[in-house]
Amino acid sequence: KDVVEAAEKEPQKIKEALPKKDAEELKKKLEEAGAKVELK
């Protein structure tokens, strides 16, 4: 539920300073839930 709500809001930071592997895993989960994700 929280992921869906986050996906519907304005762009926002979810996590910072994650190892690349963890960031990629989180990105995949968020995209599967319908979010648009940008890693920086």
Image: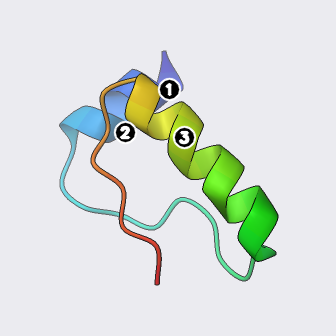
32 over 30 or under it: above or below: above
Along the polypeptide, which appears first: circle 1 or circle 3? 1
* Badge 3: residue crowd in 10 Å (few <14, some 14–19, many ≥20): some
Mark 3, secondary structure of its residue: helix
Residue 17 horizontal side relative to residue 30, left or right: right
**For numbered disc 1, what is the local secondary structure?**
helix
Q: Amino acid at mark 3?
A: Lys
**Label 3 – label 2 distance at C-alpha:** 15 Å
Q: Residue at point 24% right, 61% down?
A: 11
Of the image marks 3 and 2, the number of the one nearer the N terminus: 2
Residue 6: % across, % down = 37, 39
Label at residue 2: 1
Compared with 32, 23 (above or below) is: below
Which residue in the structure is indicated by mark 2? 6
Question: Residue 28 has which mark?
Answer: 3
What type is the residue that disc 1 sits on?
Asp
Q: Are marks 1 and 2 in contact (CB under 8 Å)?
A: yes
Q: Residues within 10 Å of mark 2 (few under 14, many from 20)?
A: some
Name the amino acid type tagged 2: Ala
Q: Quadrant of residue 22 in the image?
A: bottom right
- Residue under the image location 63 percent in, 65 percent down: 15
In the image, residue 30 lies at what x, y percent?
48, 37
Coordinates of residue 33 in the picture (x, y in percent):
41, 23
* Mark 2 element type: helix
In the rendered image, residue 36, in percent from the top left (x then y), is placed at 27, 48
In the image, taking residue 28 as reference, residue 24 lies left or right, namely: right
